Image (tube, grey):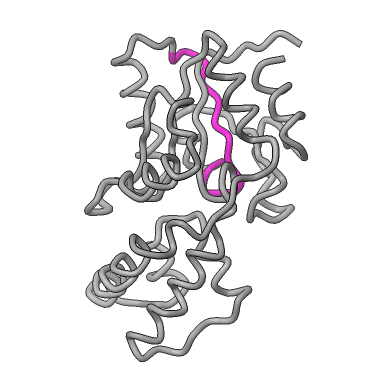
Amino acid sequence: MTTKWTCILFDLDGTILDSAPGITETLSWTFAQLGRPIPTPAELLAYVGPPILDSFRDLAFMTPEESARALEVYRSRYLQNGVFDSKVYPGIPAVLKRIAGSPLKLSLATSKPELPAITMLNHFDLTKYFDVITGASADEVRSRKADVVEEALLRLRHLGADITNPIMVGDRKHDVEGAAEQGVPTILVKWGYGSKVEEVGTFAVAKTAEQLSALLLG
């Protein structure tokens, strides 16, 4: 198969890195610091992937003021500890290396703010494979996946990349739906945090890194 894609966007949590342990531990600590009941492990896992302010609102039913405070508490611990409590999914470095050796430009497109995203990629020596690192803004104003995808495409275009036929790689429905808002199809990876129902609307589903590599580059 010859690839038809002109550039590639990659999600981070659940796609490149199994970052759930650091996120869920930090969330448990955050809820305890705020004097709130700590959600179950399964409930905490639902926070991994979507913009965290959205999750505080939709899953913990916090007001905007409460969400802002929770985010402040969360970040104070996550940037010191949780950000390093992750591991790279098997085969992903080889996929990223293959993309880097191809003519296609590659951007990260994560709802995680750029500082922790860059910190994590640097920690695992993966930054070198990316032409652009795009994430949520520090103030979370840009955190919707559609907005992150739009910004990633803009940055790639500024590099001179061909963005006429991009592809998104992610693991959750917000990757699929956010990319679709920008007219970008998504390959959903099965090793992340999504469920079967989140495959709806995807271009394809990859069960292994090898399958993903073939779908991206042939």
How many circles with numbers are drawn on the protein?
Answer: 0
Q: Position of residue 108 (x, y in %)?
A: 44, 34
Q: Residue at x 22, y 74 (%)?
A: 65
Q: Position of residue 167 (x, y in %)?
A: 55, 25
Q: Is residue 91 left or right of residue 63?
A: right
Above/below status of 53 relative to 128: below
Residues 37 and 57: in front is 37
Q: Residue at x 54, y 55 (%)?
A: 86
Q: Position of residue 147 (x, y in %)?
A: 35, 39
Above/below status of 79 relative to 102: below
Location of residue 41 by image quarter: bottom right
Above/below status of 140 relative to 215: below
Which range of residues does the magenta coloring cover?
163-176
Q: Position of residue 166 (x, y in %)?
A: 51, 21
Which quarter of the rendered picture does the C terminus lie within? top right
Which quarter of the rendered picture does the N terminus lie within? top right
Location of residue 123 by image quarter: top left
Q: Residue at x 44, y 69 (%)?
A: 58
